[in-house]
Image (cartoon, helix red, strand yellow):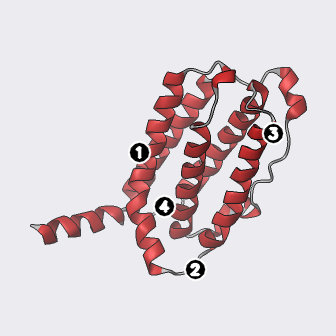
Amino acid sequence: MVLLLCFSTTALSMNYSLLRFQQRRSDTVCQKLLRQLPSTPQHCLEVRMDFQVPEEMRQAQKFQKEDAVLVIYEMLQQIFGILTRDFSSTGWSETIIEDLLVELQGQMDHLEPIQKEIMQKRNFTMGDMTVPHLKKYYFNLVEYLLSKDYNSCAWAVVRAEMLRNFSFLKSLTGYLRD
């Protein structure tokens, strides 16, 4: 019984096609939820800045499926962390944010077994090199929110950046193939 359970967990974690399907569905739900939040007011465009998405994200076609898993997992963790910060100045619906956090957590739960397997193998991949760049990128987003005292314009700019992130996530999800 235990052997069967271990085998089925491993078999499930390596089913990239199923994972791709789950991720695409969830990415679409997250984008839809983010779009339900108020968009960037015109006067907020003055405070926009270039957060400099890592160059590797613009060259995602070079990623292997293992790279995609590592990068997607890191992006979801970072987005989750940002959305748990003080957004009270925005007037955003707590229900939408909670639904978004539940969806993000579900995605991470699906990815975690595969992410752990990849990390245990310790093969250095493009994804390994991209993760530190992603951490710096998300650190810049958080620093931006802090520097603006989490005001509604800063959140509107970060929301627009997150929508852009989900476009990257959708393209990365395409690399999850068996």
The residues bearing labels 2 and 4 have C-alpha atoms spaced at a distance of 18 Å
Observer-side mark, 3 or 4, equals 3
Residue displayed at 54% across by 51% down: 77
Q: Earlier in the sequence, mark 2 or mark 4?
A: 2
Label 2 amino acid? Phe
The residues bearing labels 3 and 1 have C-alpha atoms spaced at a distance of 31 Å
The residue beneath circle 2 is 124
The residues bearing labels 4 and 1 have C-alpha atoms spaced at a distance of 17 Å
The residue beneath circle 4 is 176
Quadrant in which residue 157 is drawn: top right
Q: Earlier in the sequence, mark 4 or mark 1?
A: 1
Q: Which mark is on residue 106?
A: 1
Q: Secondary structure at mark 1?
A: helix
Q: Quadrant of the N terminus?
A: bottom left
Q: Secondary structure at mark 3?
A: helix
Observer-side mark, 4 or 1, equals 1
Label 1 amino acid? Gly
Label 3 amino acid? Ser
Please, is residue 53 above or below residue 35 in the view? Answer: below
User: Dot 1, how many residues are within 10 Å of its Cα: few (below 14), some (14-19), or many (20+)?
Assistant: some
